[in-house]
Amino acid sequence: MEGSEAIRPDKDGPVIVQEAWENLGMYTGVEKREGTYWVRTERGGAAVEFVTDDMLRIKYFLGNDPEMSTTVAIDPAAAAGGEVQAQLEETEGGVRFRTASLEVTLDKLGLSMTVRDREGNVLAEQKSITFSPDGSAFGVYDMPQDSHFYGLGEKSSFLDKRGERYTNWNTDVYAPHMPEIEALYESIPLLIHMHGGISCGLFLDNPGRSDFDMRSHGVAFTVSCTTGSYDLYFINGPELKDVVKRYTALTGRINLPPKWAIGYHQSRYSYMNQQEVLELGRTFRAKQIPCDVIYLDIHYMDEYRVFTFDPVRFPDPAGMIRELREMGIRIVPIVDPGVKKDAKYPIYQEGIREDHFCRKLEGDLFFGEVWPGTSAFPDFTDDRTAKWWADQHAFYTELGIEGIWNDMNEPAVFNESKTMDLDVMHRNNGKPLTHEELHNIYGLLMSKSTFEGLKEQLDRRRPFVLTRAGYAGIQRYAAVWTGDNRSFWEHMAMAMPMVLNMGLSGLAFAGPDIGGFAHHTSAELLIRWTQMGVFFPYCRNHSALETVRQEPWSFGEEAEAILREYIGLRYRWMPQLYNLFHEAAVTGLPVIRPLILEYPHDPNVTNLCDQFLLGDNVLIAPVYRPDTDHRAVYLPEGTWLDYWTGEAHEGGRYILAHSPLSVLPVYVKAGSIIAEGPLKQHAEDGADDAVTFHVYGADAEGDFAASYRLYEDDGVSYGYEVGAYSELELKVRAEQGRLVLSCAYPHRQYEAKRESLRFVLRRPKFRPAEVEGLGQVTLEQMEQGALGWAVDGQSGDLIIQVQDRPEGGQWAVISA
Ligand code: GLC
């Protein structure tokens, strides 16, 4: 128990005397050099670059001109400053820049910044920017009454971050993730500010410690950092979606993952030996529970030495991997950064010989305790070392491995600070910086090296990397899981806002350990969590040593049947999911979305985070409390159809969903088309790309219209980069008593393996009499491949099966 010392006024060190902080002083002039405007003051200045008309970079500095290179967060593909023409004007009180969409004013005293749109609306108002003698920088921003905050990556608590305070400092938090925990494993210093119906983003590109405080200052929020430079990007909206798209244009978007990586994954700390792993794979297949990946946690290694297998537990890894691959299951082993200090261990020997490990300024190696005992840590900030590490992965890829799980890469160390000493001096490609300054990019650089190594070794097949730690831009290299949660209902609930905000922060491929990692899950919790988890972008069941087993068959037949059904559902929704992953890779919009992203002007959804959208039109409302078979569901404007029953509900209100244990409430917006595929046991199961387009709320009258674009490729290679993909465009529209369906392939350099296409009009609002040019067949005949149309007597759905022709086609349903 803590005593009063816990609230001692000076417990965090001496209170900083505000007077010791200084601003930049008076403006002295401005000069443009290449793409950069150097606005100077008595004590320093600000370097201003316009990345686009809607995005500005401002780097504040005390003293001499700083270097303008960016961190690894910035996607090299994003335009560097200089290409945008801004008009510069000096006014009495400040300097003003104008682009096609923004007006940015820097105050002559201290260069605090105000950003307006061209209509004069204030988008961001910085009240002050000050610096402390110890190198901290502190920005104060106006926080209007109606402010809401999103983003910030992987943080605890609710969706809207108003009233919260967070630190960005990658931290291994095993003790439970609670709302008061300010720092977790990932740091994404992007704050999205929504007020007055307008959204904009502030991204502080600083891989040291930064703080975002929307709690302590009443009418202001603050964005500060303790080391390094105050390198700030302003990202314009006006809609939330614009901010997400622009932020991801700057820091990059996910790579299109291999399809198997978006299947169901099974993990445990640890599957202890080869027999157990093989048995696990066989059980999945015997029980017909789909699965694409089994993870090997730390026990696969020889005394936790990375790039080894324990010779007793795993005598024949190649044979094991081969056998699993024949079942359609891939192995993803864990790789931590700590390299065991062991004079007989070749990786350690080589790392020492070639000087790859982190050192203090004085030259001493940094050693820390992790799973293998005393360990050294590669200095990924040096390209030479990153390449060395990347090359080591041939050990795995030569065994047929295509995915790697990076853990403990905050880096986590078993000591008081939980990480590497702050005075480690990273080589940083010839521009040495302390660990304190670079802490948050260590994990990203490790996963980048891993991704690049795999990519090179996999001969044009797409790799998969999973990481625990990361920084802005990590989405270009790895999927992210949310670390050591617990089998608590509260943690299931918290996974929603956490992953939703990760999605708004560029991390479109993310998810929690389903069922909970630490503590003991129950049948009910595992079922409810899996129902939710199969609609999350990343879908893995993982649990800790000494907790009750949580493989899908661990709780008897009834639970197993429900879990089988929902895991199967993920596979049936694979075409839809893959389409959304493709959209995320192209636009940066996340796979699952908070309602606020699609309905930014609906006041009911500003902090709604116990339900979410898959894409823009499927609403998932998980049950996240025990013994609960009803829940309130908010339906935004429009008509929503119950996925299971087809029942239509008018939106703009709450409804009460009946949700017994076997039912996850799912609603699809009328006017949507959803692509479903066949049930598969794994993503590459069979040569069957059959697809059924479900059309929701179709009407032959009025102005009913729906459209869809299905992206397809081989799911494994980079062929799509050179055109080997297809896009199938579908249009459905009412035309005076007829419903006209048409499809076409605007691009077809991947030939899907199917003969026909199927359309299902879910509970159409009209009674179909015939489909022009097609004969009526029975449902059984259709199952055998017959072309034609049929009405499902039970559901009232109209089903149409047509030939899948490269030239597409058009069909009209005539209403009775
Ligand atoms: C860390 C990881 C966890 C893993 C364990 C052992 O706690 O977060 O997922 O199982 O280490 O490797």
Image (spheres, grey):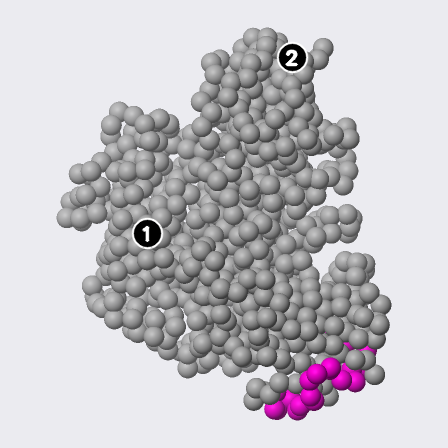
**In this picture, residue 710 sits left or right of residue 395:** right
Label disc, if present, on residue 456 of the rendered structure: 1
| Point 76% across, 61% down: residue | 635
Is residue 22 visible from the viewing direction of this image?
Answer: no
Label disc, if present, on residue 84 of the rendered structure: none
Q: Is residue 310 covered in magenta? A: no
**In this picture, residue 151 sits left or right of residue 750:** right
* Image position of 686 with respect to 228: above or below: below
* Image position of 280 with respect to 218: above or below: below
**In this picture, residue 468 sits left or right of residue 581:** left
Q: Quadrant of residue 52?
A: top right
Q: Quadrant of residue 297?
A: bottom left
**Which stretch is magenta?**
762-782
Is residue 282 visible from the viewing direction of this image?
Answer: yes
Residue type, label 1: Glu
Q: Disc 2, ligand 1: is the CB inside 8 Å?
A: no
**Real-space Cα distance between discs 1 and 2?**
52 Å
Q: Disc 1, ligand 1: is the CB inside 8 Å?
A: no
Q: Decide which of tag 1 and tag 2 comes sooner along the chain.
A: 2
* Image position of 239 with respect to 10: above or below: below
Label disc, if present, on residue 109 of the rendered structure: 2
Image quadrant for the C terminus? bottom right
Q: Nearer the viewer, mark 1 or mark 2?
A: 1
Badge 2 marks a residue whose secondary structure is loop
Crowding at label 1, few (<14), some or many (≥20) Cα neighbours within 10 Å?
some
User: Residue 361: image x %, image y %?
Assistant: 29, 25
- Asked if labels 2 and 1 touch by Cβ distance under 8 angstroms, the answer is no
Residue type, label 2: Leu
Q: Is residue 768 covered in magenta? A: yes
Q: Nearer the viewer, residue 336 or 466?
A: 466
| Point 73% across, 82% down: residue | 771
